[in-house]
Image (tube, grey):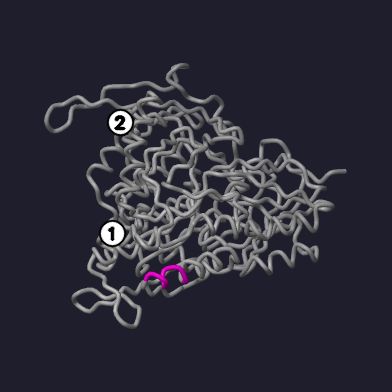
């Protein structure tokens, strides 16, 4: 058997690794490219594209004085030396330091539309020593100076397109216009076919210089809902369903009970955080008492118990207790519909004879919950939330859309009131891109950033900045306590639960090791094997 068929419940919006913000895209990119460094399944930072992890201790990272600012103050920054492993793009062109220089130029351009633009704008310069050696200078001292988890773009292909019109780059990138171009890959596999929303085919990259992968061909099929995905798994049209984007927890649990003789179902507690973003520009949601009322009207524990067999713990904030930076500082919100009604009354939304709530201007408290269609668990959770909010007088309309459309709208803050989805992070990651006031996407900044609620709090900004700059983990944990406390007080998003990812692996497939964080299992695809 030299082919592997993977089934997923979500299709990526783009295969450009710099523009992608979906886990489905990251899963595929991780088979065709590699980042410089990444957290491995043991949550240890390791090199994938570098020869040695740069650290202050080994001298490959240094705190340096930067040129004085406008007021004559000398600032501190960091230099990080990188030596690349020999790698070659699929068209035979070597991967060089110039690819990283170009990638950073794209990332920090104000019109590029890169979601995590702040990471790139902090790089003041790239000093290229030769094709495999370069030094980046960062504009500040941060604890995560050697977390270099971005994928390079092939400058020989993408640079002419970007230089022609940076503002239109995201609509003209070769990753979407000609995704089977071999020069886009330097990992174990390269894309050979894309049928949007249906399938993506990969074949071995003959220029890959690492351990040889077993499968000649990998076919990733996308299904419009998780029920169809399960049916195709049972019929043999799909071999394996990854936890990154697959069956719901309840489906996987039932599947294990029925088919344990043929499949290993691995349940991995993860740093994936299920939550509901609040559009803070919606005047109905501007009063924090309304947001607190909504959260207290939702019986999250019962949702976890009934839909997830109690395996997905209720979240009090956006940092998982498994994370080394977790703090119990966040205030918990218990299920309390009576208190929710009192808060709504205090906020000026009184219940009228028809049962609905209106304010003094006669505005009805009517909201919309946006979410990605196709996942049975999401549908069930949304329906439960709708029913429970109705009991306290809040009308909630459900609006499901295919993932590509849903996340495309979310990236431009096109949601009326509430948006239900999940974030996945790496261990110890500071949630700057989702909470800092400078990370609110807008037309002016090219829709960069992931602060979709539009949250602004100077105290939160200071806590996020402090957490990044603090090298001592004990003192950094104090900043995280502030982040969690402010998050729970302000509720720019409503915490729901921390997800357990389920991997449905045929017993004949070996080498798949779930990570429980942002690093996809497919980063180690060359270790996967069919058992003899």
Circle 1 residue:
289
Q: Quadrant of the C terminus?
A: top right
The image position of residue 227, as x and y in percent, is: 67, 68
Q: Quadrant of residue 186?
A: top right
Q: Horizontally, is 271 left or right of 512 in the view?
A: left
Residue that sits furthest to the right in the current view? 532
Mark 2 neighbour density, 10 Å: few (under 14) some (14–19) many (20 or more): many
The image position of residue 39, as x and y in percent, is: 55, 35
Q: Is residue 169 visible?
A: no
Mark 1 neighbour density, 10 Å: few (under 14) some (14–19) many (20 or more): many
Q: Horizontally, is 136 left or right of 322 in the view?
A: left
Q: Is residue 53 visible?
A: yes
In terms of sequence position, does the residue under pointer 2 or pointer 1 come before the other? 2
Regarding mark 2 in the picture, which secondary structure is present there? loop
Regarding mark 1 in the picture, which secondary structure is present there? helix
Q: What segment carries the magenta color?
A: 387-392
Q: Horizontally, is 502 left or right of 461 in the view?
A: right
């Amino acid at each position: 058997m030299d082919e592997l068929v993977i089934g997923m419940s979500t299709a990526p919006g783009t295969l450009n690794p710099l523009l992608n913000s979906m886990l489905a895209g990251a899963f595929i990119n991780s088979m065709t490219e590699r980042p410089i460094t990444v957290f491995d399944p043991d949550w240890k930072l390791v090199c994938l594209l570098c020869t040695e992890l740069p650290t202050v201790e080994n001298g490959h990272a240094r705190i340096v004085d930067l040129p004085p600012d406008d007021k004559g103050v000398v600032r501190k920054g960091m230099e990080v030396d990188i030596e690349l492993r020999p790698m070659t793009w699929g068209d035979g062109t070597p991967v060089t330091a110039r690819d990283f220089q170009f990638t950073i130029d794209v990332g920090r351009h104000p019109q590029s539309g890169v979601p995590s633009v702040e990471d790139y704008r902090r790089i003041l310069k790239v000093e290229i020593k030769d094709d495999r050696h370069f030094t980046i200078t960062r504009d500040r001292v941060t604890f995560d100076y050697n977390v270099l988890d971005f994928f390079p773009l092939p400058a020989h292909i993408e640079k002419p397109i970007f230089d022609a019109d940076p503002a239109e780059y995201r609509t003209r990138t070769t990753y979407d216009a000609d995704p089977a171009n071999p020069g886009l890959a330097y990992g174990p596999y390269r894309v050979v076919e894309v049928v949007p929303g249906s399938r993506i085919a990969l074949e071995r990259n003959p220029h890959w210089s690492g351990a040889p992968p077993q499968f000649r061909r990998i076919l990733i099929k996308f299904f419009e809902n998780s029920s169809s995905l399960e049916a195709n798994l049972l019929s043999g049209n799909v071999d394996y369903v990854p936890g990154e984007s697959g069956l719901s927890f309840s489906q996987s649990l039932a599947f294990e009970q029925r088919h344990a003789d043929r499949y290993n179902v691995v349940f991995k507690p993860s740093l994936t955080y299920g939550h509901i973003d609040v559009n803070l520009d919606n005047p109905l949601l501007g009063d924090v008492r309304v947001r607190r009322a909504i959260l207290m009207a939702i019986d999250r524990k019962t949702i976890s118990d009934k839909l997830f067999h109690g395996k997905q713990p209720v979240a009090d904030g956006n940092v998982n207790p498994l994370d080394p930076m977790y703090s119990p500082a966040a205030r918990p919100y218990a299920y309390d519909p009576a208190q929710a009604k009192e808060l709504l009354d205090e906020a000026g939304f009184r219940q009228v004879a028809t049962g609905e709530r209106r304010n003094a201007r006669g505005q009805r408290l009517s909201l919309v919950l946006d979410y990605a269609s196709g996942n049975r668990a999401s549908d069930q959770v949304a329906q439960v939330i709708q029913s429970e909010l109705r009991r306290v007088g809040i009308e909630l309309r459900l609006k499901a859309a295919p993932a590509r459309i849903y996340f495309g709208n979310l990236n431009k803050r096109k949601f009326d009131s509430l948006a239900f989805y999940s974030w996945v992070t790496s261990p110890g990651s500071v949630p700057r891109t989702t909470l800092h006031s400078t990370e609110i996407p807008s037309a002016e900044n090219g829709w960069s950033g992931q602060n979709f609620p539009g949250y602004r709090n100077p105290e939160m900004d200071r806590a996020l900045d402090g957490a990044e700059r603090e090298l001592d983990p004990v003192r950094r944990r104090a900043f995280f306590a502030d982040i969690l406390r402010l998050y729970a007080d302000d509720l720019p998003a409503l915490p729901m639960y921390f997800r357990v990812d389920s991997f449905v692996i045929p017993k004949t497939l070996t080498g798949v090791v779930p990570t429980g964080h942002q690093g996809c299992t497919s980063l180690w695809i060359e270790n996967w094997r069919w058992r003899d």
